[in-house]
Image (cartoon, grey):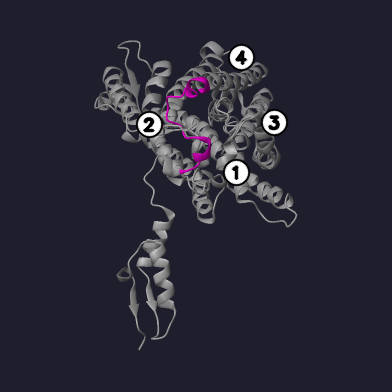
Amino acid sequence: MAKNTNIRISLPAVCFVWQIAMIILFGVFIRYDEESDTHWIEHRRKKNISTNLENDFYYRYPSFQDVHVMIFVGFGFLMTFLKRYSFGGVGFNFLIAAFGIQWALLMQGWFHHLDENDWKIKIGVENLINADFCVASCLIAYGACLGKVSPVQLMVLTLFGVTLFAVEEYIILELLHAKDAGGSMVIHTFGAYYGLTISWVLYRPLLSQSRHLQGSVYHSDVFAMIGTLFLWMYWPSFNSAIADHGDGQHRAVINTYLALASSVLTTFAISSISQNNGKLDMVHIQNATLAGGVAMGTASEFMITPYGSLIVGFCSGIVSTFGYLFLTPFMEKTLKIQDTCGIHNLHAMPGVIGGIVGAITAASASESVYGQEGLINTFDFKDAVANRTVNIQGGYQAAGLFVAIAFGLVGGALVGGILKLPIWGDPADANCFDDDVYWEVLPETMSVAMQLSKMIIWRSADSSEHTYSKTILSKLELSEPQVMCIRPP
């Protein structure tokens, strides 16, 4: 049965109504925090702060820039690998990220930053970073549904995804007091299982009708590799952006840097050895090389040691690459999960590895390694958890991983059921992975015709080239004057 993919009413309605709602909610709840408000001068004097350099902006903004580039450029271009879905990959990434960061500032603000004195949300640069983190989970989920859903469905996915993220983040970080600076559990594990479950609910039994569009071409893989390189370079900032000032951030950058480097070598090795001719698969290089950054998220600011970081990257690169080789086909054929970007291999499994590594590293921490003050500072053993031991902390870290998985599975099932309603303008099975459904796209034949119209054809008096060119132009419905025919001297 043909589907109506006309979103001329639904998409503008969702964008306008939801943006107006954001304006109203921001007007009611959002205010500048003390470090971004004009009362900063008074705050400095009150807290005996001698210089503006103590403002959190100077500590956090460089990391915010890097994370922001990852969200809009890294994730966006990573999704351009499909031969006919580059507009959708980078364009819809732009749309849902722009909406998601606004909703995230509200949702995370209500849970974490609501001032009990005036019931306002006070935001600064760290809130912007956390909003980007929240959006990252929705972009991960988008990867599983890439090419198979409408932009209206993506907006709904983001609305509920951000809401679920804020709740599970509050439970894991505040109630369980688990540490997860780089988001292996909160961002990657939740986002991946959220997207995979939605994809499972939205299973398309006749998706093979679009199989010819599900692959890549040479230039689309090159564009996707741009996204990979941006993500790879800036991932140390992602994992360290909200870590403690000083040694915590410093250690997170080093650990992530080493894990990423290690995962690259193992990815290249497994990709080559898996082929009879030893050739590399660009899918593996685009994705599994990032697995080390995902797996290092939870333990990034722990004393995991440099060689421990290399081990984490080594293992995650192997697991991720084998996932693309064996698990992705198995999941589609047996489990009915159509994972377009392979987020199970890049985010779900490395995210689980990261959660396990974090729990083990926390449980094995000791004063001889961290020092008494270092142990308290790293795990924030203060106030209500001042008497918590490292063994108990390890248990809560493991509990946080189960919470992230549970929220992803249950939330994905509920949201998938909503998205399955026949009102969202999603494409038919035969029209998936094609920009032409939702974008103004110049037909390929016209693109060729435009190139031909700019050619200069050299011919001699008795040459057959001009006749041949006229034949091509007639098939493309172009007239001869669009080609300059010049007789050589």
Amino acid type, mark 4? Arg
Q: How many callouts does the rendering have?
A: 4
Amino acid type, mark 3? Thr
Q: Which residue is drawn at 31% across and 68% down?
A: 482
Mark 4 or mark 1, which is nearer to you?
Answer: 1
Provide the residue designation for mark 2. Answer: 56
Tell me if residue 274 is in the magenta stretch.
no
Provide the residue designation for mark 1. Answer: 260
Mark 2, secondary structure of its residue: helix
Write down the quadrant of residue 95 in the picture.
top left
Magenta residues (range): 416-434
Is residue 65 shown above or below 473?
above
Residues packed near mark 4 inside 10 Å, few (<14), some (14 to 19) or many (20 plus)? some
Is residue 360 shown above or below 213?
above
Provide the residue designation for mark 3. Answer: 334
- In the rendered structure, the answer to whether residue 139 lies left or right of residue 204 reads left
Disc 4 to disc 2, C-alpha distance: 29 Å
Is residue 287 shown above or below 115?
below
Depth check: 249 or 145 in front?
Answer: 145
CB under 8 Å between callouts 4 and 3?
no
Q: Give the image location of residue 273, x and y in percent.
A: 74, 51
Residues packed near mark 3 inside 10 Å, few (<14), some (14 to 19) or many (20 plus)? few
Residues packed near mark 2 inside 10 Å, few (<14), some (14 to 19) or many (20 plus)? some
Q: Give the image location of residue 34, x and y in percent.
A: 31, 24
Mark 4 or mark 3, which is nearer to you?
Answer: 3
CB under 8 Å between callouts 4 and 1?
no
- In the rendered structure, the answer to whether residue 273 lies left or right of residue 355 reads right
Amino acid type, mark 1? Leu
